Every structure is written in C-alpha cells, then in structure tokens.
Amino acid sequence: MQKALSILFIVYLFVFSILVGIICSPALLKRDWSIAVSKFWAGGLLGGLNVLCGVKDEVRGAEHLPEGPALVAAKHQSMWETLKLMVILPRPSFVLKKELEHWPIFSWFCKGNGFIFIDRASGASAMRDMTAKSRARLAEGHQIVIFPEGTRSLPGKRVPYQPGVAMLAKTLKVVTVPISHNSGEHWVQPGPLKLPGTITMTVHPPISSIADRKAYLRAVEDAIEGPEEAA
C-alpha cells in the first residue's frame, strides 16, 4: 500500500510541477515573483507528501534561520531538504550541479530564482565561478545553500565533506548556518518509496568564518553530524 501511495505521490509531483511551471511562467519576469512561485510549488509538494504518504516534518532551532546574506550548509539525503529550505529561507540560492541546468521548467525557475550552477569537473575554474556568483547573490540579499558532502548520502553513512564550502566561507566572509535532518529515513533513496513519519530538521547556531579551513570544516561537520561521529 505504501509503495502504491509513493508512486501516486511521484505522479502528483510531476503533474503539479508541470502545471505550476507552465501556468506561472510569467513570474520569471521578476526575481521576487519567481521565488514566490517556487515557495508555493515546494509547499504544495510537501503538503502532497504529507497527505498521500503520511510524511510530516518539524523544524527545530528556527530562531537561527538567517534573514539576510549567509551561507547555509545542509545535510543532503534526498529532494526533501531542497523543498523545505525553499520554503523556510527568505531568498535561497542553491548551488547545483550543471547537469540540472538543462531540465525543462525546473531550470527556468532555478535561473529565475538566482540559483548557481557549477561544472564540478572544471576544478579550480568551477570554484572561481561559484565564488563570483555567490558574492553577487549575497549582495542581493540571498542565502547561499550548499551541500558540503557534494552528493547525497544514505542515513547512517558518512561521506567526506568537501573543502569547497570552507573556501567559499573564507573568501566571502559570511556566517555559515549548519542544518541537519533525517529526510533519508522517509524519502528513501534510491527508488520511489516514501515512509510515513516525521522528518526532523535542526537549524544549528551560525558559525563565523574561521581562517583555518580544516578547523572550519570540522566545526561544520561536528554541527551537522555530531562531534562524537566526526572523522
């Protein structure tokens, strides 16, 4: 039964996304309109996830959510955290892999929202590009959302944190807000299965830019993973 409901949610996800994308495409003319539509879209999907699959959520530490420019470093286990952060952050600008730039409709609003696409195979060039675009978005009042693991991880499985987030924080000199959650326990990867229950997202106190990259990366990892598990 749960698998059937999960597949029904996937159908809803695609149909709702296409309808919102086409009907609301005029919103792409203005950044604030595009962000508002994206928040509506993300909220609609989270609502559908609750109704169809019984997946609820709660946010702890919401008082630490940034209202202005900041770097947000979040655990990455599924699509869920992208949706939730789209809803709860005022002006999120996600750092995404360049391959997503070619997805129809989705990429329209990513660009309309000021998301940052990077070619991970470009090495130092990608880092310079990400830094320049992040600086521009911060000047516009955005929160830069980055997944420091660089890829999705399964619940309970550790993935090494990439140095890019440390380099970005040091160069841009903004606070970093670490965010942890357990979305992978309910938005199961790989496959369509969505398990009922409550996803808990925790927003941790901000970390100031630290000159030593290793110390900074350890501080971010300790906040997200827990110091007793940090490598």
Image: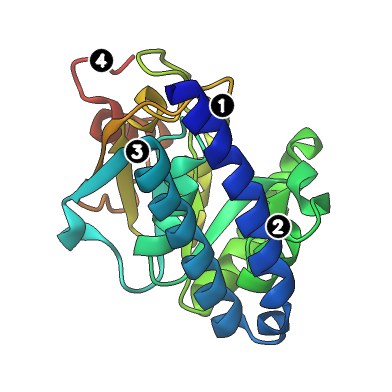
Mark 2 neighbour density, 10 Å: few (under 14) some (14–19) many (20 or more): some
Of the image marks 3 and 4, the number of the one nearer the N terminus: 3
Viewer-nearest of discs 2 and 1: 1
Q: Position of residue 183 (x, y in %)?
A: 37, 33
Image depth: mark 4 or mark 2 in front: 2
| Mark closer to the observer (3, 4) | 4
| Residue 115 against residue 126 in the figure, above or below | below
The answer to whether residue 197 is visible is yes
Q: CA distance from mark 2 to mark 3?
A: 33 Å
Give above or below for 214 relative to 116: above
Distance CA(mark 4)–CA(mark 1): 29 Å
Secondary structure category for the residue under label 1: loop
For label 4, the residue is: 229
Q: Which amino acid type is shown beneath numbered disc 4?
A: Glu
Where does residue 113 sit, x and y in percent of width and height?
61, 70
- Quadrant location of residue 173? bottom left
Q: Which residue does the numbered mark 3 point to in the structure image? A: 216
